[in-house]
């Protein structure tokens, strides 16, 4: 797994905070809703796709943003696993602009702005789900 992208990806496939967040989201779904779907003849997979997943899409959007930002900013694990410079993520590239005795601020600032663009794009894409989830969070039935 050393020097492979799978070595960097596999340890982070199960994110403990994500398990907790989605567990809490699933517990917030009323059992009466699921029982009504079972009475109507829906199978478990259909209940998940048609009822549960639309109800927790706000939590999935928030989790997607959080996981993307955490893993996009990861510095230590890629340094341990990847040994070729072409496999390093952008955060390691940002560290290259910081020298022992000086910092090339014009290069570092330009690179930092370019690195933030994908995070900003992901946030703008998923922002409506998060705002919709906050607006409807306190509503019952």
Image: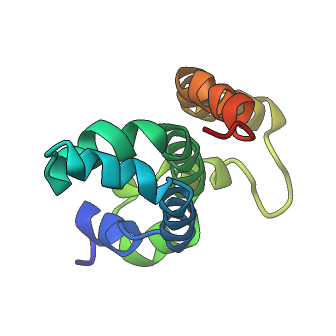
Say left or right for 86 vs 15: left
Toward the front, the furthest residue is 39
Instruction: Name the residue: 43% across, 54% down.
Output: 32
Q: Quadrant of residue 118?
A: top right
Above or below, 138 relative to 125:
below
Which residue is depicted at the point 83% across and 36% down?
A: 105
Q: Nearer the viewer, residue 31 or 128?
A: 31
- Picture coordinates of residue 101, whole percent (x, y): 86, 60
Vertical position of residue 50 compared to residue 132: above or below:
below
> From the image, which quarter does the C terminus lie in?
top right
* Relative image position of residue 21 (x, y in whole percent): 57, 62
Closest to the observer, 81 or 116:
116
Q: Residue at x 79, y 29 (%)?
A: 106
Q: Is residue 22 visible?
A: yes
Instruction: Count the marks.
Output: 0
For image coordinates 32% across by 47% down, the residue present is: 36
At which x and y percent is residue 64?
49, 45
45 or 95, which is in the foreground?
45
Relative vertical location of residue 123 with respect to residue 1 in this rendering, above or below? above
Q: Report x, y in % for residue 42.
A: 16, 45
Depth check: give the residue in front, 73 or 130. 130
User: Is residue 4 something one can see in this rendering?
Assistant: no
Left or right: residue 48 versus residue 135 is: left
Is the N terminus in the top left, top right, bottom left or bottom right quadrant?
Answer: bottom left
Please indicate whether residue 32 sits to the left or right of residue 86 in the image. Answer: right
């Amino acid at each position: 797994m050393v020097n492979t992208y799978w070595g960097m990806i596999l340890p982070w496939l199960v994110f403990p905070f994500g398990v907790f967040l989605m567990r809490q989201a699933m517990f917030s779904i009323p059992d009466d809703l699921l029982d009504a779907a079972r009475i109507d003849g829906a199978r478990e997979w259909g209940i998940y796709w048609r009822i549960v997943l639309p109800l927790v899409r706000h939590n999935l959007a928030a989790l997607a943003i959080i996981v993307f930002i955490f893993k996009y900013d990861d510095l230590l694990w890629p340094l341990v696993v990847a040994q070729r410079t072409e496999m390093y993520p952008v955060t390691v590239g940002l560290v290259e602009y910081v020298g022992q005795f000086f910092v090339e601020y014009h290069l570092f600032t330009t690179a930092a702005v370019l690195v933030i663009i994908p995070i900003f794009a992901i946030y703008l894409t998923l922002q409506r789900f998060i705002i919709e989830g906050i607006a409807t969070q306190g509503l019952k039935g």
